[in-house]
Image (spheres, grey):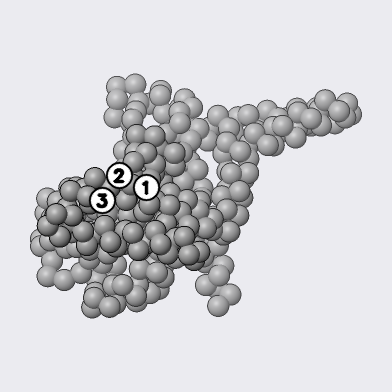
């Protein structure tokens, strides 16, 4: 690490000490805003874009809806325009691609595909008994960068999926009387790590966010990097919190690390399912339907890849 960042770290440590020294507490509080900026700079230097995350993101973007159908439609349209003798078959492919893009963006398609990811049933928090030992493990679901409303706190915020998981994990921790481990890094290479953002929200909800793991960029790394922290605390049983369509694969990774896993899935429901016009609206393209379709297809690919890897081993 460059000497400049070493000096910044030293300044942070000096500030923390000054808060507890009479006469210097005013100086320390006056530099709180600068301290937050310094922490953000140090965090940015510590993180680098994760190559595996970048590759998988590119592949998923090009293959899954809307990217896959739109790329196919673009190629078919180009062929129909440039090669007259292939115009009819290319036109059929273009029509199929547009229909696929429509269907993939419907809540009906998203729910159908998500049901094929072998989701675990939800827990009943109101019937949950306090646990003597264990932990709630909270998996990140992505961040928002350049969040201007949090410019003084690293300009990073939790995305919608991460917020759902974090709120549910905090309520589960309250019901089970267990501490929380939040896991999730900064795969894009900058901003506040996701685990730190989740820790803040869990603490704001009055729960014990005892551990954070900030290096991971994949579900496999969530399990691999969290395991040593839990083992060091003597924990072998965990509640695993993630979305229901992500649970099957996440559970396999944590069980592979030797933990006894109780699934605590979240994220059911939608904006139109229970409305009077839900039957019709669920057949129309919507952003929430498209996102659920993407998540379900991505999980299907992830489960297939994990099974292939385990079969090779």
At numbered mark 2, what does the secondary structure look like: helix, strand or loop?
Answer: helix
Q: Of all residues shown, which one is farthest toward the front?
A: 23
What residue is shown at x 38% (from left), y 52% (from top)?
38
Residue identified by numbered label 2: 33
Q: Quadrant of residue 275?
A: top left
Q: CA distance from mark 3 to mark 2?
A: 17 Å
Which corner quadrant of the image does residue 67 belong to? top right
Check contact, mark 1 vs mark 2: CB within 8 A. yes
Question: What label sits on residue 200 in the rendered view?
Answer: 3
Residue 42 pos. (x, y %): 42, 56
**Residue 78 pos. (x, y %):** 79, 30
Q: Which residue is mark 1?
A: 37
- Report helix, strand or loop for mark 1: helix
Examine the image and state in which quarter residue 14 appears: bottom left
Q: Is residue 206 shown above or below 136?
A: above
Q: Quick one: 157 or 312, which is closer to the camera?
A: 157
Q: Nearer the viewer, residue 224 or 109?
A: 224
Using the rendered image of the protein, determine whether residue 99 is visible from the camera's viewpoint: yes
Q: Tell me if residue 199 comes above or below residue 224 in the rendering.
A: above
Give the label on residue 159, or none: none
Residue at mark 3 to residue at mark 1: CA–CA distance: 17 Å
Q: Nearer the viewer, mark 3 or mark 2?
A: 2
């Amino acid at each position: 690490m460059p000497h400049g960042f070493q000096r910044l770290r030293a300044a942070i440590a000096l500030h923390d000490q000054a808060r507890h020294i009479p006469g210097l507490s005013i100086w320390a509080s006056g530099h709180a805003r600068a301290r937050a900026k310094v922490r953000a700079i140090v965090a940015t230097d510590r993180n680098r874009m994760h190559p595996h995350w970048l590759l998988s993101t590119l592949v998923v973007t090009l293959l899954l809806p809307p990217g896959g159908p739109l790329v196919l439609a673009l190629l078919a349209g180009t062929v129909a325009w440039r090669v007259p003798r292939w115009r009819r078959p290319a036109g059929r492919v273009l029509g199929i691609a547009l229909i696929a893009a429509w269907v993939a963006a419907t809540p009906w398609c998203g729910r159908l595909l998500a049901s094929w990811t072998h989701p675990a049933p939800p827990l009943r928090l109101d019937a949950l008994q306090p646990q003597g030992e264990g932990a709630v493990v909270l998996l990140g679901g992505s961040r928002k960068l350049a969040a201007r409303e949090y410019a003084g706190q690293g300009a990073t915020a939790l995305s919608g999926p991460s917020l759902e998981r974090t709120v549910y994990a905090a309520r589960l921790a309250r019901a089970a009387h267990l501490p929380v481990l939040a896991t999730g890094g900064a795969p894009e290479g900058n901003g506040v790590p996701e685990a730190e953002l989740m820790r803040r929200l869990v603490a704001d909800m009055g729960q014990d966010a005892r551990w954070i793991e900030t290096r991971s960029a994949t579900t496999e790394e969530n399990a691999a990097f969290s395991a040593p922290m839990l083992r060091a605390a003597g924990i072998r049983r965990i509640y695993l919190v993630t979305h229901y369509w992500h649970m099957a694969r996440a559970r396999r990774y944590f069980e592979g690390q030797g933990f006894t896993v109780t699934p605590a899935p979240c994220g059911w429901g939608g904006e139109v399912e229970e409305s009077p016009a839900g039957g019709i609206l669920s057949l129309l393209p919507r952003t929430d339907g498209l996102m659920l379709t993407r998540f379900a297809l991505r999980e299907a690919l992830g489960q297939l890849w994990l099974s292939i890897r385990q079969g090779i081993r």
